[in-house]
Amino acid sequence: MARPKMLKLPEVLEEIDMSRAAFYRMRARGKAPRLQKLPNGQLRVSRADLDAWWERCEQRAAA
């Protein structure tokens, strides 16, 4: 079984066109995609979590 694609935080920030500071503000409000912290301290976002987050954003925009 293939492991899920994990994106580095800079890749996520580039895809969503957002600064790191804005992302962390959104995260503090509980509105950001779920982050996973690796044992070495690096942060990752799974492709599935990011896609689900995009879907929720689209649903909120349509409402």
Image (cartoon, rainbow, N blue to C red):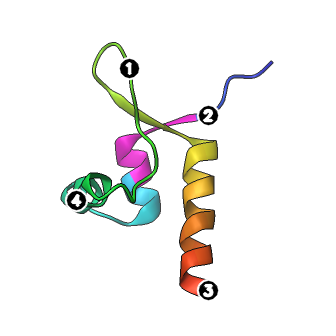
Label 1 to label 4, Cα distance in Å?
Answer: 21 Å
Mark 4 or mark 2, earlier in chain? 2
Label 4 to label 2, Cα distance in Å?
Answer: 25 Å
Residue placed at 46% from the left, 50% from the top? 33
CB-based contact (under 8 Å), mark 3 and mark 1: no
Image quadrant in which the C terminus is located: bottom right
Mark 3 or mark 1, earlier in chain? 1
Amino acid type of the residue that numbered disc 4 sits on in the rendered structure: Arg
Amino acid type of the residue that numbered disc 2 sits on in the rendered structure: Lys
Q: Range of the magenta residues?
A: 6-12
**Whole-percent x, y for residue 37 in the image:** 36, 26
**Whole-percent x, y for residue 24 in the image:** 24, 53
Badge 1: residue crowd in 10 Å (few <14, some 14–19, many ≥20): few
Amino acid type of the residue that numbered disc 3 sits on in the rendered structure: Ala
Mark 1 or mark 2, earlier in chain? 2
Badge 3: residue crowd in 10 Å (few <14, some 14–19, many ≥20): few
- Nearest the eye: 21 or 62: 62
**Whole-percent x, y for residue 48 in the image:** 64, 44
Question: What residue is disc 1 on?
Answer: 38
Q: Is residue 34 left or right of residue 3?
A: left
Q: Secondary structure at mark 3?
A: helix
Rendered view: 29 above or below 5: below
Label at residue 62: 3
Mark 3 or mark 4, earlier in chain? 4
